[in-house]
Amino acid sequence: MKNIVSCLLIVLLGIGATALIPATAPKPRKLVKVWETDTTLRVPESVLYDGQNTLYVTNIDGKSDALDGTGFISKVSLDGKIENLRWTSGLNAPKGMGLYRNRLYVTDVYRLVVINTETGQAEKTYDAVDQKTAFLNDVTIAKDGTIYVSDSRSDKIYRLKEDKWEVWMEGEQLNKPNGVLAVGKDKLLIGCTKTGALRAVDINTKTMTTMAEGMDRTDGIVSEGKGNYLVSDWTGQVFHVDAKGAKQQLLDTRKEGINAADIDYIPGRRLLIVPTFMKNKLVAYELSR
């Protein structure tokens, strides 16, 4: 009997010990540099993958709010070769982009420009309410074609839906919105530059919740899949934010003076593309585990 009790005690202690062992934490993600372009780009602010073989890159080529017509868009291959430096030109400090049905939507300081991707020619523009104070920045397009555009200077979010262009949301609670990302039908993610936070807006109610904080000057937002996101900080950082809001720093080039502007991510290749702004090049990293 004593032996049976001893055995049961050992088994119970074993179960208790197992329960005390913490679950294995997921391995930290890492970025491994794959390639970088040459430095013929001119203040590259945003990069956008076309879903096939091309990266579109906006080049400010001057001051970020100058109406000088020197801005242009480049085409870069997925291995970092600049295939067409000035695919289309004559823009004013172009920044964020969105692609929908062979039309490239690009912010142009005070207006949104619609470019035909087959010809490279601008077909239409949509002006901000106050052209003198507007600073249109990022673009995101929902699956149904609804377009959202941030105005970082005026604390506004514009919406273009069924050719109706309007101020969809505004106010100090937006905290100088930069990056925007439409998620499904009901959610819009916003990178608040003033507070360095990633926030989510319910499109139906316009209520806002904070997903993650402590990222300084948030810029680009892209999906990594399964509710996880990659968020760039213009000062030179990139973060991974998981579905629960947990944040991990993946990149920090602040000491080198290298910015991380409006990024894009290619899930099939696990490839993150970072525009370096003042350093005049793109840098591509593989996201590994």
Image (cartoon, rainbow, N blue to C red):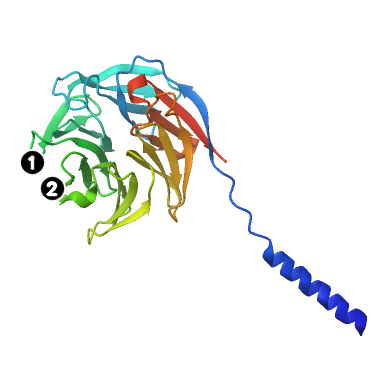
Marking on residue 129 = 1
**Residue corresponding to mark 2:** 167
Task: Label 2: state its secondary structure.
Answer: strand
Of all residues, the one furthest to the bottom in this rendering is 1
Where is residue 110, by image quadrant? top left
Q: Is residue 154 left or right of residue 1?
A: left
Question: Which residue corresponds to the image point at 11% horizontal and 36% vertical from the top-left?
Answer: 133
Q: CA distance from mark 1 to mark 2?
A: 8 Å
- Label 2 crowding class (10 Å Cα cut-off): few <14, some 14-19, many 20+? some
Which corner quadrant holds the C terminus? top right
Task: Label 1: state its secondary structure.
Answer: loop
Amino acid carrying mark 2 in the image: Val
Amino acid carrying mark 1 in the image: Val
Q: Is residue 26 left or right of residue 213?
A: right
Question: Which residue corresponds to the image point at 37% horizontal and 15% vertical from the top-left?
Answer: 39
Answer whether labels 1 and 2 touch (C-beta < 8 Å): yes
Give whichever of discs 1 and 2 has the lower sequence position: 1
Where is residue 52, by image quadrant? top left
Q: Position of residue 89 (x, y in %)?
A: 20, 20
Where is residue 69, by image quadrant? top left
Closer to us: 54 or 235: 235
